[in-house]
Structure formats: C-alpha cells, structure tokens
Image (cartoon, helix red, strand yellow):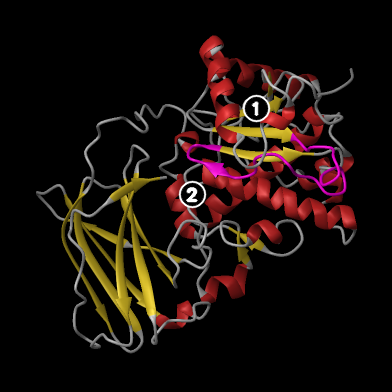
Amino acid sequence: MNGLSIKGMLGVLLLAVSGVVQGNVAVPEHFSARAKELLADSIELAPAAHAVNVVYFLGNDNEPEPDYERRLSELLLYVQQFYGKEMQRNGMGARSFGLRREANGNVRILLVRGKKSHRDYPYNGGANACLQEVAEFFRAHPEEKHSDHTFILMPTFHDEQNGEKTPGGVPFYGYGRDCFALDYADFDIRHLGKNTREGHLLTKWLGGFAHELGHGLNLPHNAGTTSDVALYGTPLMGAGNYTFGMRPTYMTRSSCRMLTASETFALAGDETDFYPEGAPAPVIEEASVVPSADKLVVRMRVSGCAFVNLQVQDPPFQVNWDYDAVAFCMAEEKLPGTDSVVYSLEVPLAELQGLQNTRKGVQALELLLTQANGWRYRWRITLDWSKLTLGAPLPLPALDSLYRGY
C-alpha cells in the first residue's frame, strides 16, 4: 500500500474526523527524506481544542508555488514541534497550536482565490483587502473555521524585485490574530541548516514564518535574559527569525506562558470563551517598584487576571522597536478569601546586559496582564536611572491606565 501504513492511516482518519490533529501520528510516506529525519524525534502533543486556520491566498491571475501542500505541511509540522518542545521545556506541558490534517497526513491548507490581481495584495496595504476576502470565504464555509487565528500564505511576486532567489512583495507580518508569510518554490525543509544560499534563505523566511505565526498566536516581541541567551541562543520572538534552523533559537518562558492563554493552545475539552467582547479588564489594586544597585523589586496585587509577565526595554518604546524587551514571568500568590493575587518579581540587573540604559538612562517596564480568555493588557512604567533614588519606590502611573492588545 502506498502512503501511510494501515495503522497510521487509521490514526490520521480518526483524528481528522475530530477536526484537530496534533503531531502524534506517523510521518506520511510521501514526505521528503529530510522531513522524516527532522520529525523522527517528534514528541507526542496533547490534543488541542482548536486549530489555526491555514490559508493559501492567491490573486485571480496567479497560481500556487509547485508542491506547496507537501512543502508547507512539512514546515508547519516542524514549527509545531518546535513550539511544542519549547512549551514542554518551559514547564507548560507538551502542547502546541492545533493543526488539521488531511487523510494523507498533509496539513489542511485552504486555497482561497481573491477577486483581484495578485498585485492588488502587496506588502504595503494589501493585508486588509486580503483579510476581507478571507472573511468572506469563512462566512461562506463556516465549517472550515476552527479558531479566531488565521495564518495566511501567499506566493512570492515574480517581477524585477522579487522572485525565487529574492522572494517578497506580499504581506509578511502579524496583524492581530491574523498573520502573513510567503511561499516560493525552494521554501523547502531539505535546505534547513545548510550553509548554502538556499539554506540561508530558508532560515530567513522560515524564521520569519515561525516568528510571524507567534504574533498571530498573541505573542509580543521579547528578548532573553543574559543567562538564557548564553544557554539557549536567540529568542524566536526577538531576532530568532534570523537564526532559526541555522543557530540555536528558543522561546522564552514568558512567550510560552502567554501561549497557555491562546485559543489554539487550549487542550481538548477546554470550553473557554476566548476573546469575548465586553469582558471586564483586570484591576490593579496596588503596585510598587523599588530599584536598588543590583535589582528591581516589583510587586502588585491584581484581580481578574490569569498571570502577569514583565518586560524591561530601552527606548524607543513604539511597536516594532521592542525586540530588546527582556522578558520575565512574575511569581504569584493567591490571597485566601479574596479574588486577588499578589504578583512579585526581583529582576537582577545582571540579566539585563543586552540593554544599554540599565543603571544610567531611561527604561520602560511593561507589565503584561493576561486573562484566561486570552485578552492581554499592558501597563507601562517609565524610569530614569539618572534621576531616581535607590531604595525608594518609583512614582507610578494611574492603576487603571491599562490598554488592551494582543
């Protein structure tokens, strides 16, 4: 029999009926030798309640890149395993984003053709037009939508600037709970880790693929502590999109913790209503930040929150200038008889060696308050080391100055 073994085929079919399949079934026989090699050490992932919607979007005048279903399936399953292994390493369990699978073992990729020429969906300004048509597709095919998270891939433009050797032209970024990446004929796992033009090109685009997917799953940018960078390499949600597959790349514990409140990481049987409109914001009841010569001591009492992470960064503090934001998870202690939780953290300044302004300039502390329903809120505290008094609490912004984001 060609393809999967009888046992493997039955496993895929049974799981496919349930809608979401994780990476715990046999690697399909039609996958490449390199994919089989790289997926040979796959861990068994806990069944997921929801799946990322994977869309291959075309204009009305172009076609998919050759063999896209096999190539992208191999890459998606490899990235799914990377996320799952990092979740496990960080103590969050062997879980990853859900993916649906076809009967032959490929990832289910929805082919959606737009109404306009492919050039009407460019990198700058093309995302909204694409998303409108993807939304129309899901309204017409509601059975194909398995979460609020959609990963959209588009074939590279083929023109004077873009092509197989220099892919580009299409949207490639996170966009709320949607995210975009590109495809080209040599976007193939067989090049992973090779010191060749194709290998370096794959690291750039597969690293970006995994990184932008992270944004679509609710992750912000972040950087690693001095200790973690020395141990594990470069965080995926920092500059890991330039190292993935070529040099050591990892996910911070902060990223993995946030993924536990992302819809597609919910475990089978979880009935959480994710991202409900009108949900009340967390309430910061009290907070303090005390700097000293070797650490920052942060403490806050909060209700209506599942957990709090903290990031420290140098300016500027705008979106896409936060790749240097060193991330930490705050410890928590439930207060008996109340709905309040005390979150606390001592940030050793030695762990901030990647930042230039520690002990001498302006920095921001971003408190990321995440609810069990997936909503995340930011509370920013700015400090100027040149003006503060060591041992004295910092003046803080209003406790209700939260803003919601992904």
Quadrant housing residue 108 = top right
* Disc sitting over residue 55 in the figure: 1
Q: Residue 234: x and y, percent?
A: 62, 65
Secondary structure mainly formed by the magenta segment: loop
- Would residue 365 be found to the left or right of residue 176 on screen? left
Disc 2 residue type?
Answer: Leu
Residue tagged by mark 2? 219
* Disc sitting over residue 33 in the figure: none
Quadrant of image for the C terminus: top left
Q: Is residue 171 magenta?
A: yes
Measure how far apart labels 2 and 1 are at the Cα level: 20 Å
Query: Would you say the residues marked 2 and 1 are in contact, meaning their CB atoms lie under 8 Å apart?
Result: no
Crowd rating for badge 2 (residues with CA inside 10 Å; few <14, some 14–19, many 20+): many
Instruction: Give the residue displayed 45% in from the left and 58% down from the top.
Output: 254
Instruction: Give the residue displayed 46% in from the left and 77% down from the top.
Output: 352
Q: Residue 242: x and y, percent?
A: 70, 60
- Would residue 76 be found to the left or right of residue 254 on screen? right
Q: Is residue 84 visible?
A: no
Instruction: In this rendered view, identify the residue nearer to me: 25 or 240.
Output: 240
- Would residue 58 be found to the left or right of residue 331 on screen? right
For the record, the magenta segment spans 155-178
Query: Would you place residue 251 above or below residue 217 in this image?
Result: below
Q: Residue 248: x and y, percent?
A: 69, 64
Earlier residue among tags 2 and 1: 1
Instruction: In this rendered view, identify the residue nearer to me: 49 or 169.
Output: 169
